[in-house]
Image (tube, rainbow, N blue to C red):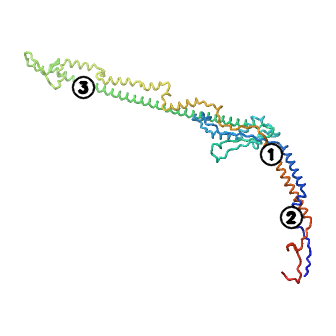
Amino acid sequence: MNRNVPLHVTPSSDEIDLYDLFHSIWRQKRLVLGCAIIAGVLGGGYAFLAPRTYEVSSVLRPAALNELDALNRSEVYKLPPADALSKVGAQLDSYETRLEFFKSHQQLFKAFQKPGQSLEQSFEDFNRNAVNLILPDPKKADSLSSYIRLELQYPVDVDGVAILNGFVDYAIGAEREQVGADLKVIVNNRLNELKGKIDAARANYENEKESKIASLLESDRLKRAQLQDELSALRLQMKMERSDRLAELTEAIAIAKSLGIKTPTTPSAMADASRGGSGQVMRTEVNNQKIPLYFMGSNALEAERDALQRRTNDDFTNARVAEIGKELQMLEVNRKVEVMRRRDNEDIFLQDVEPLRAEVARLRNLNIDMSNLKLVTIDRRAQEPLAPIKPKKALVVALSLTAGLVLGLVIALIRYVVQNRGQPAPYSPLEEGRFSRRERKDDEPLL
């Protein structure tokens, strides 16, 4: 059975024939190479004509222990090498330090000063784009990783080596001055503290001295009052004893006169006189009884009574009165109080202040040459670079050629797609049953 298969013309398909694509690009190889060459020439021109940027760097490391030994041995300011490096790094990263260096060395930064910009604006542009501070990884704690790296990027008409080395020296000097100022403040504060302690000890001594003087004077007053009371009581006692003696003598005189005793005698002598004994007789009288007073005779008793009546002071009759007088005389002046009040240099009597005075003398004689204090070691100073870091000629040319080649390929691909879409493509009949189409007749069974 013969079947008529009509040919249908359809628009071009979205699928791309790679062979035709490569063939089309090859036909446009001059275009692709031309784009690559043009881009390479432009890149080379930029690489050779663009402003060159140079970079210098300086590396700082911790100073040796002996460099900071004089400062640390002062026992006033402790500064380990790692802390000194951190302080210098803080100065290098300080906006104020950089600005002060910029202002004090304006002749080095003329290339960064643009017309219409203030000094601060020019510095801001320099500080933001030119200076870079690099610190080690904080996770690495070994001594080999302790460093500070400072980088400076600058154009060709700038003395970057002088700027970086000058700034490093300026920052180290600024930190050295800061350490010296801190040391001076700490020493002055310590001296004021020690002075306060010595003044407190002096005030305590004055209080103790006044308290001791008051205690001594009070003790003297108390003892003087007690002695005067004792003297008054003793005189009253002696006066009463004299009155009692007068009464006793008056009574004895009356008895002696009644017995006719004028001179001193004894009971045995009176007995012999009454018997009118003869011969020489020696008697030894042993008697433990007190002989009555009237045996002294009226003459002696009257003489004693007259003397007692004429007496106006009984002090001499008791030795204690003289002792009391001596003690009262000694209490007139307290020599301890007098000596304490006449002390010329009372500081030598202060207790527990010798260590404080020694510390004051040590701090006042503390002499640390801050001008030679080496806070960090400059491991590498900035040196003239051998070549600029920007632009990198080989890289710029290579990227330009690559970009030109890619651009040429893109243009060739676009031209191929545009040309391919503008031409119709017929479908082949019965090509694998996918691209042929026919209509089913009414009497044809369905397959």
> Which residue occupies the foreground of this view, 301 or 148?
148
Q: Is residue 155 left or right of residue 24?
A: left
Residue 216's x, y, as percent?
A: 42, 29
Of labels 1 and 2, the one closer to you = 2
Q: Is residue 311 visible?
A: yes
**Which residue carries the number 3 mark?**
244
**Residue 319 against residue 377 in the figure, above or below:** above
Which of disc 2 and disc 3 is earlier in sequence?
2
Q: Residue at x 49, y 24 (%)?
A: 344
Give whichever of discs 3 and 1 has the lower sequence position: 3
- The residue indicated by pointer 1 is 392
Type of amino acid at the residue the image marks with label 3: Asp
Which of 251/146 is in front?
A: 146
Which residue does the image show at 44% across and 26% down from the upper left? 337
Residue 273 seen in this snapshot: no
Compared with 379, 284 (above or below) is above
- Earlier residue among tags 1 and 2: 2
For numbered disc 2, what is the local secondary structure?
A: loop
Q: Position of residue 39 (x, y in %)?
A: 86, 50
Q: Amino acid at mark 1?
A: Lys
Q: Disc 1 to disc 2, how far (Cα)?
A: 41 Å
Residue labelled with disc 2 = 17
